Amino acid sequence: MIHTIETLPIVTFVKIAETNDLNLLLKRKPKYLLKLFLKIFKINLSEEWQKIGEEYAKHEDSKKNIKVDQLKIKLSKLQGKYYTIISALEVLKYGEDADMLKILESYGYTLKGEYWKGLETIYKQVTNLKSKIDAIQDEILTYTSANEEKEVNIHEILTNLSLGLELPFKTNELTTIEYIFYRKALIKKIKSNTK
């Protein structure tokens, strides 16, 4: 009734990703019957699409995607630290506050010497943290913008895949899971040919 990663054609997968038309998840039968079926059994197409996306990501296991995810986690932690420190410093600009000083100390920053000079020193040290955050954001942008610049034509990709593997297949019938494994096979073939 509803496509899975094993039955969903890759062309349809890409079309759903581009248009967000979740009705394409329904197999070719009278759609009104399928919609009735979904209603009766309380099946949510958004949840089904999310499952397919998660399954795709699990099999895709792109090193670039893993790297971007790791960078986003690191970025999130550094931003939390940065904003907490800046907030504490902003409060301390209006006078001493023991709780704010403890927050700074928990992140390894201590006031040394005269109060105002100590705050100024910590502000300067925090700019290094901001520079790290900016560098990670730039790195994430580099990884993600490389994918966004290219306009993807799935038929062109599938044709190149077919030619590279020297396998004839009907592009409109190739399932999403088959596409993933054919793509991995082509990558292995290219790597072995370059050695």
Image: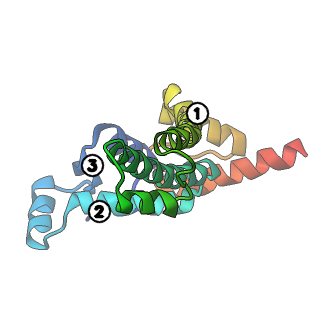
Q: Nearer the viewer, residue 5 or 97?
A: 97
Q: From the top left corner, tell me how far across and down residue 136 is, in percent.
A: 57, 41
Residue 2 in the figure: left or right of residue 163 = left
- Residue 24: numbered disc: 3
Q: Amino acid at mark 1?
A: Thr
The residue at 44%/44% (across/down) is 172
At mark 3, the secondary structure is helix
Whole-angstrom CA distance, mark 1 to mark 3, is 33 Å
Name the residue located 59 percent from the left edge and 37 percent from the top edge.
Answer: 135
Image quadrant assignment for residue 108: bottom right
Q: Nearer the viewer, mark 2 or mark 1?
A: 1
Please tell me whether mark 1 sits on a helix, a strand or a loop.
helix
Residue with the most extreme right position: 195
Comes first in the chain, label 2 or label 1: 2
State the image coordinates of residue 115 (x, y, percent, origin top left).
47, 45
Instruction: From the image, state whether disc 2 or disc 3 is nearer to you.
Output: 2
Q: Which residue is mark 2?
A: 48
Say what amino acid the circle numbered 2 marks. Glu
| Disc 1: which residue | 142
Q: How many marks?
A: 3
- Mark 3 residue type: Leu
Q: Position of residue 28 (x, y in %)?
A: 25, 53
